[in-house]
Amino acid sequence: MKKLIALCIPALIAAAPMDSLVIREVAKSGYKNIQTLGFALSELGSTELIADFNSTGSLIPASVEKLFTGAAAMDLLTPLHDFKTEIYLGEFDKVSGVAKNIAVKGFGDPGFTAEQLWLLATQLKLEGVTSLKDTLFVDNSYFDSATMGPGFDESTSSRAYMAPVAALSVNFNSIAIHVRPTEIGSPAAISFLPAQANLTITGSVKTVATAEKEDLNVTTKFDGTQSVVSVEGVVGVSDKSRTIYRKLWDPVQAFNTSFTAACNQVGITCSLTVIPGTVPEKVKPFYTFHSRPLQDHVKDMFKYSNNFIAEMIFRTIHAEKGNTAGTWAGASKIVTNWYKKVASDTSKTPTIVNGSGMSENNRCTSIAILDVLRAGLRNERFGHEFASAFPVAGEDGTLQSRFAKSPLKGNLRGKTGTLNDDGVTNLAGYFSKNGKTYVYCIFINNKEKTQYEHWMFQERLLNKLYESL
């Protein structure tokens, strides 16, 4: 500890009291490689730092990266941006209600859930459609053909947070597998959301007297034609029902099976062969389904750190502002240029490779995050919506179980960022005291301690700063 303090003595000569407070807390916590930490604190209306610890160090932001995506999207697309979904009918007999050669085009709706799909099918029923026949064309041309972004592991993981991203996607391109115990010796009840037409299921789950959480294994894979769900293991008879989320590997087939099932649910019979396709230009849609506004999706993205939402919004930025199919590379350039316009210091431009932070190749400084926070919170058009999107300490989102006994509970708002393999545990946001609002960023890219220890350090540091302001 003495050695660490000695290393920081030159900084103390001209440092403000808050700087020395941060240095003392770092020393007490026992971090050895202090360059893996970064911290900055300032008043919302000022670029002058109240406290600074390696604030110009370029570190991995993880999901704090979503602040760039959310602020840039709210600014460039407007808070009420509509991610529409269009339905086209090649032929439609209004008397019989039979439609042939259906095309569906997506425009990047990140919140097109099972409920939304059911509403779309219901609207088609209300428009007189009773049967869908021949071909279902799925148009994903609003984005380019890539579905896995930089930093995502396509080949090995079926985890929902690594789901593929396509312009027309249902339920985050994932499926919720619901497993409910029945009676000892009998198979567990298994159901899905969204409902799936012709879903292939392998394996079985048996109800036993007692079981551990690890005794149930759920995975998905792609067999070349469609996603296959494997559900194997046992569940305890007295266990609560469990819902496990897994990705669906092929967005075209995922849409087909979900759309067909939703249509069947509302009384529209389907006999369709699905193929990727592109809607001809100048053809008018039969029906347009409108999404929730962008500001709602940004809130979901921040509160629950949803990677899929982030990447859908990220690519939409390029599709809208680049006047071409949305790409990760194109969105990176646009968001980086947006940041340069709000930056207090452009000497260290962030490296932005995707919209969610799911890559160790994303890099930025704590100061850059403060710039983004100011740009979002002080914006006259969307500042209130941006501020309300953050998780609230001790109350909801990814901070629901943190700061429970802190004076900052219910006051501090923060976006979390975690990459366990890289020791990344970050937190950035704002809090208020005595009528003033402060913005902060704590980067920890350090494998020396556990995630819980990182959390406790962040809480102790913020508590000390709050008490000292």
Image (cartoon, rainbow, N blue to C red):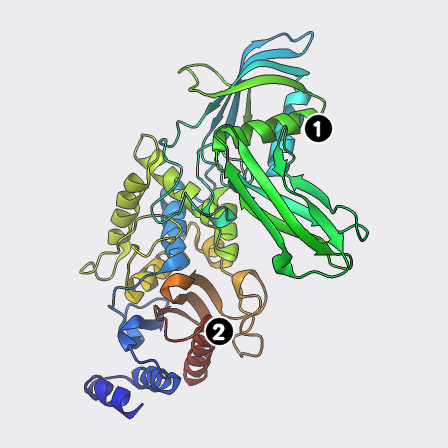
Q: x, y percentage for residue 124?
A: 63, 22
Circle 2 crowding by C-alpha within 10 Å: few under 14, some 14–19, many from 20? few
The disc placed on residue 158 is: none
Say above or below: 338 vs 278: below
* Percent coordinates x, y for residue 271 in the rendering: 62, 16
Q: Separation of disc 2 and disc 1 at Cα?
A: 45 Å
Name the outermost residue toward the right.
Answer: 183
Frontmost of labels 2 and 1 is 2
For residue 456, side relative to residue 339 (left or right): right
Amino acid beneath label 1: Gln
Residue 26, quarter of the rendered image: bottom left
Q: Do we see residue 378 in this rendering? A: no
- Secondary structure of the residue carrying tag 2 is helix
Residue 414 seen in render? yes
Task: Give the position of the C terminus as an image quadrant.
Answer: bottom left
On the image, which quarter does residue 323 sit in?
A: top left
Depicted 108 relative to depicted 385: above or below: above
Which residue: 17% across, 60% down?
A: 347
Write the residue at 27% across / 89% down: 5
Q: Quadrant of the N terminus?
A: bottom left
Query: Of residues 118 and 180, which is closer to you in this image?
Result: 180
Residue situated in front as seen by the camera: 372 or 455? 455
The one nearer the camera, 392 or 233, is 233
Residue where numbered disc 2 is placed: 452
Circle nearer the N terminus (2, 1): 1
Q: Is residue 64 above or below residue 193?
A: below
Callout 2, which amino acid?
Answer: Tyr
Name the residue rendered at 41%, 47% in the picture: 74
Q: Which residue is mark 1?
A: 265
Q: How many C-alpha atoms fall within 10 Å of the one at disc 1: few (<14), some, or many (≥20)?
A: some
Q: Dot 1: what SS?
A: helix
- Residue appearing at x 30%, y 47% in the figure: 335
